[in-house]
Every structure is written in structure tokens, then in C-alpha cells.
Image (cartoon, helix red, strand yellow):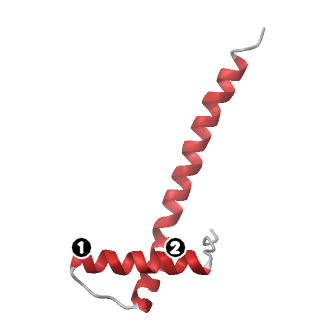
Amino acid sequence: MQIIELSKERKKELIREIKTYFFEVRDEEIGELAAELFLKFMMEKIGPMFYNQAINDTYLFMSDKIEDLFGMEK
């Protein structure tokens, strides 16, 4: 599976969020590189699970709507 490409701005924002999380929740100060590597890890290892769940949820939603549509036949 291909990794989602992030814009430069979005990547910087996420790195900033990761650094803030580590500082506020874990009382750890991490650098830009550590935050970027953590982001990459999350996108590679955990991102696909969220993606697959979204695909499944969309399939179930659309299946329900298609059934509703067939219910309108005369």
C-alpha cells in the first residue's frame, strides 16, 4: 500500500502536533527528526488499518443506501 503524501504545510503541522503531545502528555521534549520519524512510522504501520476501516465503513454505508434505492422500485 502506498503511503499518503502530505503537503509540506500539513506535514509541519502534524510534526508540531506530535512534539506538543510528547511535551504536554509525556513531559518529553523531542526534536523535529524524532517527530518526523514517529509520523512516518504511524503512517506506515497504523495508517493502513484506519484506511481499511474507512473503506469497510463506506462499503456498509453505500450498501444500505443501494438497498434503500431498490426499495423505491415500483
Q: Is residue 2 above or below residue 70?
A: below
Residue 52 horizontal side relative to residue 34, left or right: right
| Residue 48 at x, y percent in the picture | 53, 63
Q: Nearer the viewer, mark 1 or mark 2?
A: 1
Residue 34 horizontal side relative to residue 10, left or right: left
Residue 25 horizontal side relative to residue 64, left or right: left
Q: Residues within 10 Å of mark 1 (few under 14, many from 20)?
A: few
Specify the quadrant of the image occupied by residue 63: top right
Q: Residue at x 47, y 75 (%)?
A: 14
Toward the viewer: 24 or 36? 24
Specify the quadrant of the image occupied by residue 66: top right
How far apart marks 1 and 2 lie (CA) works out to 23 Å
Q: Which image quadrant: the C terminus?
A: top right
Label 2 amino acid? Glu
| Residue 15 at x, y percent in the picture | 45, 80
Q: Residue furthest top?
A: 74
Q: Residue furthest left?
A: 27
Label 2: element kind: helix
Toward the viewer: 45 or 21? 21
| Residue 46 at x, y percent in the picture | 46, 66
Task: Find residue 43 and name its label.
Answer: none
| Residue 2 at x, y percent in the picture | 64, 71
Q: Which residue is mark 1?
A: 25
Label 1 amino acid? Val
Q: Residue at x 21, y 81 (%)?
A: 27
First of labels 1, 2 by sequence position: 1
Label 1: element kind: helix
Specify the quadrant of the image occupied by residue 72: top right
Q: How many numbered markers are drawn?
A: 2
Q: Is residue 56 above or below residue 18?
A: above
Q: Which image quadrant: the N terminus?
A: bottom right
Q: Which residue is mark 2?
A: 44
